[in-house]
Image (tube, rainbow, N blue to C red):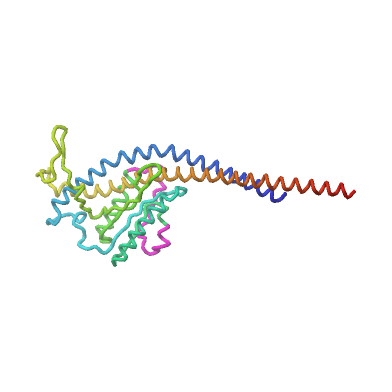
Amino acid sequence: MASLKALKVRINSVKSTQKITKAMKMVAAAKLRRAQEAAQAGRPYAERLEAVVASLSRQLAGGAGVSPLLSGTGKDQVHLLVVATSERGLAGAFNTNIVRAARRKAEELEAQGKTVRFYLAGKKGRVLKRFYPNGIVADHELGGHKTLGFTQAREIADDLLARYAAGEFDVAHLFYAKFVSALVQEPVGQQIIPVAVDVSKADVSPTSATSAPVSAGAVVEYEPDEEGILADLLPRNVAIQVFRAMLENAASEQGSRMNAMDNATRNAGDMINRLSIQYNRTRQAAITTELVEIISGAEAL
């Protein structure tokens, strides 16, 4: 009978867990749509700004008086990996994939003799402290904000820019999960300081509603001038890319959590079925044993 009680308690425990995972799945599904819309709405501006900065950077690269955010510090020794993760767990492999991508990059840089430091944006990135206990320069929590906005991205960007100006690092890479679909979240790493000039993104020029796109080789005049525009756009670009990472992470987190909780709910159902079969067999065996004992006792009389 003790075994039957233990099985019954376990079945009830799994049923309670199943109710929780099912509720979490429904909450994640409700949040996913808004997070997905925000991520998709933020992509065009972030991509266009990155393209404009890349286009201007190509023209001014190597010139005198160029901002360090474009030209760099002249060194390539200290690399800062900005790892953006979530504040909560129970989201499948979402955080693990981001951390794994950052670790792969760190190992690659260390193999080249570079110095690697980490800037954590989100509690779940703290797992890196186990592997790099002396390599964490900042641990920026985001849990104190009910909803993340551009203000939080600006805070992180300003801190990064201040550290860069102080000479704490030479290159900064940003790691996050790009939202592809509710089933797929792709870990992404991109260089944000100094600006990495991508030719494919740099070959864009202004267009108007009535004219065709200007070719990459066309002469474009900027007002007031390229240097003045870049002085404002380069810091803004860092903040926008951080904000984009936050939006992508928010959508990816909900998609990953929804799938994880769906799998957990199904697994709980399978476990309940197995335990119920085991419970019924144990109960039947106990009843059979009792009947045999009664019959044997009657025959003895």
Residue in view at x 51 percent, y 45 percent: 264
Looking at the image, residue 196 sits to the left or right of residue 27; the answer is: left
Looking at the image, residue 151 sits to the left or right of residue 25; the answer is: left
Q: Is residue 134 magenta?
A: yes
Residue in view at x 26 percent, y 53 percent: 192
In depth, the one of 286 and 226 nearer the eye is 286
Q: Quadrant of residue 80?
A: bottom left
Q: Position of residue 288 (x, y in %)?
A: 75, 46
Q: Is residue 87 magenta?
A: no
Q: Position of residue 59 (x, y in %)?
A: 13, 51
Looking at the image, residue 70 sits to the left or right of residue 121; the answer is: left
In depth, the one of 231 and 188 nearer the eye is 188
For the image shown, how many numbered marks are present on the structure? Answer: 0
Q: In the displayed image of the protein, which residue is found farthest to the right?
A: 301
The correct choice, above or below, for 277 with respect to 101 in the image is above
In depth, the one of 268 and 139 nearer the eye is 268
Residue in view at x 21 percent, y 51 percent: 198
Q: In the displayed image of the protein, which residue is found farthest to the bottom?
A: 113
Residue in view at x 49 percent, y 45 percent: 263
Q: Position of residue 218 (x, y in %)?
A: 10, 44
The correct choice, above or below, for 114 with respect to 276 in the image is below
Q: Position of residue 69 (x, y in %)?
A: 21, 54
Magenta stretch, residue numbers: 127-149
Q: In the displayed image of the protein, which residue is found farthest to the front?
A: 299
